[in-house]
């Protein structure tokens, strides 16, 4: 299950992160024996943790739920049947390089291959980003396709993480999308407000605010401890700019597969001005099988959430399956 070697492109924004295993072990006060790493797993998808996220990992705990999300463990080397490089049929859904469509009315624009953090369970960890860049890297073929199809009413900016793009490029993209008359909504799928909150500076806030009436931002947190005071303030800034905020999580063994953790996450999201949207069952991507939680457990966890929370703080538990008309709820 060797990944084709695809070094992800650099971020367009200045940022501080680490790719250095020893530095992380040192910071967390863990030895190489306590925290073993896999070289093979890192070949196509290197360790990458922004400082803001690193600071929230507890010292001395190799099983910390934040650490597990970013650490390239030996378990990634396991070759598990059914886990592959294109787990959700992105290849087959490609309309034109950089543009995927699976569902009626909405298409997903792969704006960049860069991310601020590398999440080990990511379903696009083997995505062939290099095949989705047009020559000028300006999304022109995707934009032409969107302009020519009046049935598209919503565009999802995804990647990678669209907020790794410079404000200049993001402004240009939003402006071009904003001029397409049949588009009613634009959505940004991003982990940056959670993992690199400083990126949401005033100029970016002002840019997003201009599109507030049609903009939805879906952030991504899996554990309440990811949402510290700085993230809280950043998310409220976005809310004050009238941007609708939703969260998606992935159900991950060792990270959030406990009712009290999922409940705490929903409670904390609300405090941060965000409503839960989806709780995804893991996509079977090669290298992530050790994160899998059974459907039976997942359903029991959802039941526990329903017993403890108002309905609007219970996310939809869904699984994406190639060829389905929507992300199917698991009941
Ligand atoms: C997940 C996804 C969407 C969004 O689906 P919603 O149910 O509207 O959130 C759209 N397009 C693609 C290709 C997706 O993978
Ligand atoms: S930020 Fe999103 S796209 Fe990037 S590695 Fe994490 S889950 Fe994947």
Image: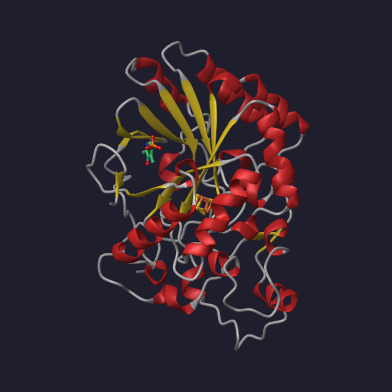
**In the displayed structure, does residue 261 sit left or right of residue 59?**
left
Write the residue at 41% across / 56% down: 126
Say whether residue 195 is left or right of residue 155: right
How is the structure coloured here?
A: secondary structure
**Residue 196, image x and y in percent?**
68, 49
- Quadrant of ligand 1: it is top left
| Above or below 259: residue 103 | above
Residue 93: x and y, percent?
29, 39
Q: Quadrant of residue 173?
A: top right
Identify the residue at horizontal 71%, vertical 38% (top origin): 200
Query: Visible in this render: residue 323?
Result: yes
Q: Nearer the viewer, residue 79 or 121?
A: 121
Count of number-bearing discs: 0
Rendered position, 175 above or below 27: above
Towards the viewer: 44 or 194: 194
State the image coordinates of residue 194 (x, y, percent, origin top left). 64, 49
Q: Residue furthest top?
A: 181
Residue at the left extreme, as displayed = 323
Quarter of the rendering containing residue 78: bottom left
Residue 86 location, quadrant:
bottom left
Nearer to me, 17 or 261:
261
Please state the horizontal and vertical placement of residue 180, each as a whole percent of the image: 47, 14
Q: Residue at x 57, y 19 (%)?
A: 213
Q: Residue furthest right?
A: 202
Q: Which residue occupies the extreme bottom position in the image?
A: 33
- Say which quadrant the N terminus sits in: bottom left
Taking 118 as reference, is 90 left or right? left
Residue at 49% across, 50% down:
309
Query: Is residue 211 placed above or below 268 in the rendered structure?
Result: above
Say whether residue 285 is visible: no
């Amino acid at each position: 299950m060797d990944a084709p070697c695809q070094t992800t492109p650099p971020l367009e924004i200045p940022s501080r992160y680490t790719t250095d295993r020893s530095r992380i072990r040192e910071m967390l006060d863990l030895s190489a024996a306590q925290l073993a790493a896999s070289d093979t797993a890192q070949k196509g998808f290197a360790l990458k943790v922004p400082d803001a996220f690193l600071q929230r990992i507890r010292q001395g705990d190799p099983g910390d739920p934040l650490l597990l999300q970013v650490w390239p463990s030996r378990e990634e080397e396991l070759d598990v049947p059914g886990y592959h490089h294109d787990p959700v049929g992105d290849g087959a859904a490609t309309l034109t390089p950089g543009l995927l469509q699976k569902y009626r009315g909405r298409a997903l624009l792969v704006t960049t291959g860069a991310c601020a953090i590398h999440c080990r369970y990511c379903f696009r960890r083997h995505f062939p980003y290099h095949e989705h860049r047009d020559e000028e890297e300006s999304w022109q073929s995707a934009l032409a396709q969107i302009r020519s199809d009046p049935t598209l009413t919503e565009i999802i900016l995804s990647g990678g993480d669209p907020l790794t793009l410079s404000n200049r490029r993001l402004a240009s993209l939003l402006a071009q999308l904003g001029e397409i008359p049949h588009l009613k909504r634009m959505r940004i799928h991003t982990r940056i407000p959670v993992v690199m909150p400083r990126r949401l500076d005033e100029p970016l806030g002002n840019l997003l605010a201009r599109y507030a009436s049609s903009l939805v931002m879906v952030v991504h947190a899996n554990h309440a401890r990811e949402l510290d005071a700085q993230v809280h303030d950043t998310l409220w800034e976005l809310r004050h700019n009238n941007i609708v905020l939703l969260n998606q999580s992935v159900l991950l063994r060792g990270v959030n597969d406990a009712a009290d953790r999922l409940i705490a996450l929903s409670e904390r999201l609300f405090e941060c001005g965000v409503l839960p949207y989806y709780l995804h069952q893991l996509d079977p991507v090669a290298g992530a099988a050790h994160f899998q939680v059974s459907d039976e457990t997942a359903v029991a966890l959802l039941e526990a959430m329903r017993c403890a929370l108002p309905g609007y703080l219970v996310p939809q538990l869904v699984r994406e399956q190639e060829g389905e008309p929507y992300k199917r709820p698991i009941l």
